[in-house]
Amino acid sequence: MASDPNLVALGAPQFTGAGHSLIGFAGNPVMGTTSISRANINGTVARPLLKPSFESDIYLINGDTAALLALTQRGPFAQIETDADIHEWTEDRMPPEKTTATGSTAVGGTSLSVTYVDMFIVGATVWVPDAGDAYGRCSAVTGAGTGGPGTLTVAWFAGMAPTSAITAGTAVYCIGNTQAEYYVPVSLPITDKVQKYCVMQEFTFAQELSKRVQKSKFQIGGDELAFEREKLRKEAELQIEKTKWFGQQSWAAGTGIGTMEGVYYATGARRVNFGAVALTQAAFLDAIDRLRRHRYGGELGETWAWCSTSVRRQLSQFPAANLRLQVGEERYGININRWISDDGKGDVILTTSPIFDALGRDDLMILMRMDPKAIFNVRSALYPSLMWTDGVVPLNGSWDTGAYFFRGSQLFKDAFGHIEVIYNIGAASGTLI
């Protein structure tokens, strides 16, 4: 008798609300009392001892596309392993080479106020191309060490003084430096290393499945735990993927609960509000150009453009799309195309992200320089990947229990140079749902 899945204790439905019911006719969920019954009760209709006809397969609505997770865990990027709750790193960006004038300097004037003065020292050579290719040497620097504006006193070289007034916003460059022979060295401005950190996040995806449910849930008998576990794994990967994109960093010292920083909120990432207008080809090329104007050196890697279906359709509608778009291949479970670039810095990989669509982010495109020395997956020494652990079940217990565990984080060195977020892109033709 115990092997008959129809001999069950019927009670209130486990799921309530629209769209949820136990096995039964549409609109009539299983009802009953807590007494033992041999009938499959459906509202007022009793059909004793008959097993319902029920399709056993479940359609996995969520799918299993987790491209960023695959890229960072199994792709070309570096892996860092730690057992700490917070991981840290340092960055040392080069001093700037360009600033702007903040005031007016008349023709022949030698006092030049600039937005960022720490890039200059006494002896630095100054170039102002928009003032007649003016060129000179700093004889004094006021305000150095403040990290902000200051004033230069410039001795213009013969025949290279400004031929027009220098106005606010004019570009001012630091080219190099020159000193007299046998001079006493002057310290160069060196950017201090900046310490950054990110939090390790602990994910838990658990399930508890009674043996009765395993036998009766699909009315086919047998052990359904393997199927349920695979379904749980796919759901776990999707949650991790969404966090890798959109997680915001936080840390609760009292509880040890932390969340990691995702790509969208990466510290220092360039963010552009597109003003709810449709993407144009010129704006797309400008976005690529902004991202790829990187500092010298480094293994800069490929440029990837992740976007929603709506934005991807707009890319297909560019006037020169037939000359620039190339059908690509499938990588990490998603189809990619290539934008043939003419800036000499390689093609752009175009990727439609199911995650953006699922979260309703039709307005979003994220450009990433996939530099293997700038994007790191941070693994936990405890469980460095998604790991399954069986739970403790009492002897002769009537259920199986277990969980997937994941603990990890990520870091982006020089996010400003490697990540560009363009949001609030309007639809090209109507609103997509």
Image: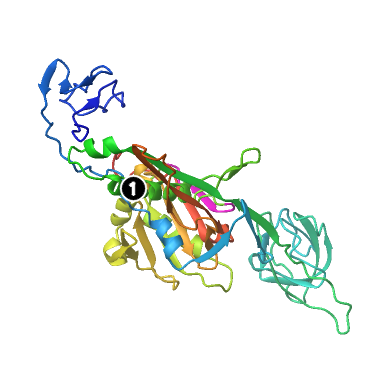
* Residue 278 appears anywhere in the view: no
Find out whether residue 268 is within the magenta segment: yes
In the rendered structure, which segment of residues is drawn in magenta? 267-276
Residue 397 in percent (x, y) is at: 37, 38
Give the quarter of the figure containing the N terminus. Answer: top left
Rendered view: 327 above or below 284? below
Residue 94 in percent (x, y) is at: 67, 67
Residue depicted at 75% across the width and 58% down the height: 105
Residue 13 in percent (x, y) is at: 28, 23
Q: Which residue is mark 1?
A: 229
Total marks drawn? 1
Rendered view: 70 above or below 260? below
Rendered view: 303 above or below 53? below
Residue depicted at 52% across the width and 50% down the height: 271
Give the quarter of the figure containing the C terminus. Answer: top left
Q: Nearer the viewer, residue 231 or 264?
A: 231
Left or right of residue 219, residue 346 in this image: right
Q: Nearer the viewer, residue 338 or 230?
A: 230
Main SS of residues in magenta: loop
User: Helix or strand or loop: what does disc 1 sit on?
Assistant: helix
Residue 391 in percent (x, y) is at: 43, 44
Instruction: Farthest residue to the bottom: give it.
Output: 181
Instruction: Farthest residue to the top: give it.
Output: 44
* Residue 198 appears anywhere in the view: yes
- What's the coloring here? rainbow
Dividing the picture into quadrants, the one containing residue 41 is: top left
Q: Amino acid at mark 1?
A: Arg
Find out whether residue 106 is within the magenta segment: no
Dividing the picture into quadrants, the one containing residue 382 is: bottom right
Q: Nearer the viewer, residue 394 or 382?
A: 394
Task: Count residues near mark 1 (Cα–Cα under 10 Å), then give few for <14, some for 14-19, many for 20+.
Answer: some
